[in-house]
RNA sequence: GCCUCCGUAGCUCAGUGGAGAGAGCGAGGGACUUCUAAUCCCGAGGUCGCAGGUUCGAAUCCUGCCGGGGGCGCCA
């Protein structure tokens, strides 16, 4: 059975044909084999036009040479040349039948694992201590989680790190507010019911009370000086916040645990060394009292060189220092080959500069560092939903609303018992939120609307879950699941279309991984579910009048579809219930 | 001012330099005593922001312009 992308396999064969026919060496990718939108054509090869000039031949002659030497009779019908030199490829029914039958024994659905596993550190989620997670954290969390799942599926080692905002000057203010609230160091009986309220109250006091400001300042000094009582209070605050995050991660179905937390404080011990190394390398300059690196190629609005400040004029460190120390840590101590940062696109320049500085410093050499940016979630007014702009939407409220909405629909439509309804509501509601986000191009902003988040028609998770539930229902009714080796017989166009689509799974996964673009997978899964429902309507499986052969064959197709949908959704962090 | 991303059907969005640019939603027409209608089928709907350029071929690459978002020194 074929492993991987059908188009790549055809490309390989075209490359061989060109070598034997014309002595030309090209890679499979350069064969330009693409799925075709032409009626009745599965793939098309566009290589003839691209090579014609280089070979000083007419495109149709190159195409003719490809066709004559293409060794693919097992896989495709006799290729036809069309238009200026397109080679149209139609997959043979027998080949499709064999592939479909073979897939039944492959729980990876044709997707191969990498032969060169990498070790990838991925920065995701990264909420701030003493602040409630809001919709802004949604994207980093679920996009990061999906990328993590995709990379692991591909056979890579992935180490998530949750870069918690757990250090810095605001903690003086926050700890003093804790003290005012009667917290005692070392006691774990405290809790904060409203993290946002806590933060706002501290901030308000800070803005109004000079004595409090002074206490906060002293508290920062104590914190950074390692004062035990202060550290104990700080830990209490971090742990309290972490418990809030855990609840959200649990609801969201993100695999992040407290072990994945590498907050800013974690890198604290490395900051001085990191900065000292940069100084020793001669990369730094003092400018306006701040210690800076000036990576080449960046300028500010006056046209002057743009600094990356790694130590503030007051001697404190900032996020550039931490980010450099982070790279240094993961490369040196953890020996990762890749560093991914799932952080909003507004920080694109920051990361470009940090990476540039890290290369200058030798922290990054062969490693691949990439800012996997994502667009902002906008309000209906088209402006970024910001925590301080008033229009805060707590993440937990968003998720609860989605689950409640799903619960209402489920109660209306189904007769499952209460427990089952509650379980389904969570799977459907959370899935809808995740899918609504993941199905957008990662890098683009999108406007948040409840309508979109809760939609259950068209390209939505519910559509996919429903398609799968219908399949599971049929398989349950059928009594026995067709075993490996069950012959697949394709007679109807809808059957054939479904198999062709199912064979596209590896290509979709590859595309999603290659560009860190989960939406490429959602698009594919939606097309697959849609192709299936067309098949479902056109091709009865268990109904009277279906021959035993067709019944078994169609059960295989249903089974394969279910596995593609369930596996695909799982790579996005979305569950697919048996019944719906 | 500079950098960067975006502009595709009424709306929300896909689109790997390849052949009449595709979905969903909405609006119109049709299909249920259901293998689960949270579904399917049919037709309508487009100066791919504008103007040049590169190319055999441009929604896609380059340049300029228009419109919008974001970023541009001590918050992260």
Image (cartoon, rainbow, N blue to C red):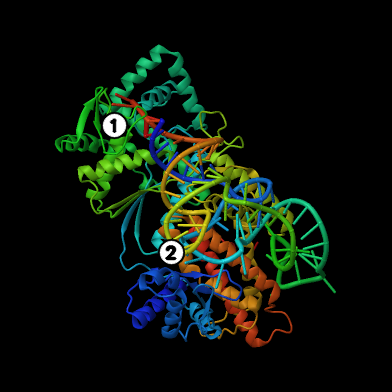
In the rendered image, residue A109, in percent from the top left (x then y), is placed at 48, 72
Q: Residue at x 67, y 78 (%)?
A: A541
Quadrant of the rendered image containing residue A468: bottom right
Q: Residue at x 54, y 54 (%)?
A: A439
In the rendered image, residue B74, in percent from the top left (x then y), is placed at 33, 26
Considering only vertical position in the picture, is A337 above or below A302? below
Q: Are marks 1 and 2 in contact (CB under 8 Å)?
A: no
Q: Quadrant of the N terminus of chain A?
A: bottom left
Residue A212: mark in rendering: none
In the rendered image, residue A36, in percent from the top left (x then y), is placed at 54, 70
Q: Which residue is mark 2?
A: A510
Q: Quadrant of the C terminus of chain A?
A: bottom right
How crowded is the residue under tag 1: few (<14 C-alpha within 10 Å), some, or many (20+)?
some
Q: Residue at x 36, y 31 (%)?
A: A234
Give the mark toward the camera: 1 or 2. 1
How crowded is the residue under tag 2: few (<14 C-alpha within 10 Å), some, or many (20+)?
many
Considering only vertical position in the picture, is A478 above or below A410? below
Per the image, label 1 sits on a secondary structure element best described as loop
Question: In this view of the protein, can residue A15 be seen by the observer?
Answer: yes
Alpha carbon distance from label 1 to label 2? 40 Å
In the rendered image, residue A31, in percent from the top left (x then y), is placed at 41, 71
Per the image, label 2 sits on a secondary structure element best described as helix
Quadrant of the rendered image containing residue A313: top left
Query: Which residue in the rendered view is the most extreme toward the top?
Result: A210
Chain bearing tag 2 is A
Q: Residue at x 45, y 22 (%)?
A: A203
Q: Which residue is mark 1?
A: A305
Q: Is residue A550 left or right of residue B3?
A: right
Q: Nearer the viewer, residue A552 or B7?
A: B7
């Amino acid at each position: 059975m074929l492993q991987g992308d059908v188009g790549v396999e055809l490309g390989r064969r075209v490359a061989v044909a060109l070598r034997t026919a014309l002595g030309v060496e090209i890679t499979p990718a350069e064969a330009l084999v693409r799925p075709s939108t032409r009626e009745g054509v599965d793939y098309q090869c566009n290589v003839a036009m691209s090579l014609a000039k280089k070979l000083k031949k007419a495109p149709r002659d190159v195409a003719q040479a490809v066709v004559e030497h293409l060794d693919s009779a097992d896989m495709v019908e006799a290729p036809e040349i069309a238009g200026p030199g397109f080679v149209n490829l139609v997959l043979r029914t027998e080949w499709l039948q064999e592939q479909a039958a073979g897939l039944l024994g492959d729980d990876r659905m044709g997707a191969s694992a990498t032969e060169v596993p990498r070790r990838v550190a991925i920065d995701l989620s990264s909420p701030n201590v003493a602040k409630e997670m809001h919709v802004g954290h949604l994207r980093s969390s679920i996009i990061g989680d999906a990328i993590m799942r995709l990379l692991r599926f591909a056979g890579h080692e992935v180490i998530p790190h949750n870069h918690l905002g757990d250090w810095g000057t605001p903690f003086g203010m926050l700890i003093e507010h804790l003290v005012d609230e009667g917290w005692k160091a070392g006691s774990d009986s405290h809790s904060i019911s409203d993290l946002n309220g806590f933060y706002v109250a501290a901030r308000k006091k800070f803005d109004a009370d000079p004595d409090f400001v002074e206490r906060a300042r002293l508290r920062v000094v104590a914190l950074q000086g390692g004062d035990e009582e202060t550290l104990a209070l700080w830990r209490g605050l971090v742990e309290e916040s972490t418990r809030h995050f855990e609840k959200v991660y649990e609801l969201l179905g993100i695999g992040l645990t407290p072990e994945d937390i590498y907050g800013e404080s974690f890198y604290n011990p490395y900051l001085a060394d990191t900065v000292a190394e940069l100084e020793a390398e001669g990369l730094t300059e003092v400018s306006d009292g701040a210690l800076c690196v000036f990576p080449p190629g960046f300028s500010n609005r006056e046209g002057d060189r743009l600094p990356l400040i790694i130590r503030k004029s007051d001697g404190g460190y900032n996020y550039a220092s931490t980010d450099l120390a982070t790279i240094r840590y993961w490369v040196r101590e953890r020996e990762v080959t890749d560093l991914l940062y799932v952080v909003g696109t507004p920080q694109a320049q920051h990361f470009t500069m940090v990476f540039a500085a890290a290369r200058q410093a030798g922290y990054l050499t062969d490693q691949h560092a990439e800012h996997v940016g994502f667009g902002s979630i906008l309000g209906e007014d088209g402006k970024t939903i910001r925590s301080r702009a008033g229009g805060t939407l707590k993440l937990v409220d968003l998720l609860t609303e989605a689950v409640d909405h799903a619960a209402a629909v489920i109660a209306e439509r189904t007769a499952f018992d209460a427990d089952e309804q509650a379980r389904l509501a969570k799977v459907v509601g959370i899935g809808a939120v995740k899918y609504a986000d993941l199905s957008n191009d990662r890098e683009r902003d999108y406007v948040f609307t409840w309508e979109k988040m809760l939609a259950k028609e068209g390209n939505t998770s519910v559509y996919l879950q429903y398609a799968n539930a219908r399949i599971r229902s049929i398989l349950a009714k059928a009594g026995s699941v067709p075993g490996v080796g069950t012959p697949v017989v394709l007679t109807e166009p809808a059957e054939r279309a479904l198999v062709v689509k199912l064979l596209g799974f590896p290509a979709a996964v590859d595309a999603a991984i290659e560009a860190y673009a989960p939406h490429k997978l959602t698009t594919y899964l939606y097309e697959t579910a849609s192709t299936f429902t067309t098949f479902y309507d056109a091709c009865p499986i268990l109904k009277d009048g279906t021959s035993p052969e067709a019944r078994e064959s169609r059960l295989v197709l249903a089974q394969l579809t279910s596995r593609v949908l369930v596996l695909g959704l799982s790579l996005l962090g979305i569950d697919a219930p048996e019944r719906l």
